[in-house]
Amino acid sequence: MSSFRYVDFGRKIKAWRAEIKPPMTQRQLARKIGVSDGFIAHIEIGRTLPGKVTLRELARVLGISELQIFQEAGYLSNVSPFDEELIDDHELRLFFRDDWKGLSDDDKEWVKSFVRIVKEKYRNKNSQDQPKDN
C-alpha cells in the first residue's frame, strides 16, 4: 500500500470524527478505542495504518460500517454488492445503534410515526412527478 493511500485514509478518519455532533477530539477517539492520542494523530496525518482490531473499533465508535472502513483502508475491494449503507449519515447510524434501545416505547412510536409521515410525503411527491397517461 502506498503512503498516499495512508494519507487519504487519515483524512477520512479525521472527516468522520468531525462529522459526529459534537465533533470528537483525537483524545476522545483514542480513549474510546483504547489507543494513545499520538496513534490517532499518526493515523490522521498518514504516517501509519491501523490493524484490523483497531479498524473495527474505529468503525464502531465512528458509526462507520466495518466494510466501509476496511475498504477505505485498502484491505478490501471497493466493489461489493453490500456497498450501500441503509443509513449513510453517521449521526443517525450512531443514534439507531446506541440510543434507540434507551428510548421509551412512546418515543419509539413517535419516531416511527415521523418516518411514516416522511415516507408518505415522499410517495406523494413521486406520484405527482410521474407523467400522466392520456
Image (cartoon, rainbow, N blue to C red):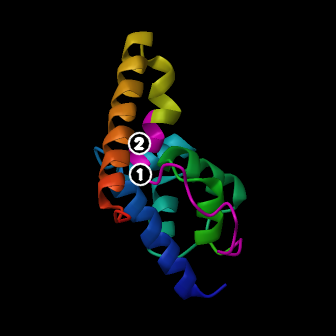
Does the magenta segment cover residue 77? Answer: yes
Residue 71: give x, y in percent of width and height.
63, 69
Mark 1 residue crowding within 10 angstroms, few (<14) / some (14–19) / many (20+): some
Local packing at callout 2 (Cα closer than 10 Å; few below 14, some 14-19, many 20+) is: some
Q: Can you identify the residue that label 2 sits on?
A: 92
Q: Secondary structure at mark 2?
A: helix
The image position of residue 65, as x and y in percent, is 59, 53
Say which amino acid is labelled 2. Answer: Leu
Question: What is the secondary structure assignment of the residue under circle 1?
Answer: loop
User: Which residue sits at x=33%, y=56%?
Assistant: 18
Residue at image point 52% right, 61% down: 39
- Tags 1 and 2 touching, CB below 8 Å: yes
State the quadrant of the N terminus. Answer: bottom right
Residue at 70% x, 68% y is 80
Q: Main secondary structure of the magenta part?
A: loop
What x and y, as percent, mark residue 94? 46, 40
Nearest to the observer: residue 28 or residue 67: 67
Q: Nearer the viewer, residue 60 or 110?
A: 110
User: Which dot marks residue 89?
Assistant: 1
Is 128 a magenta residue? no
**Magenta residues?**
75-95
The residue under label 1 is which amino acid type? Asp
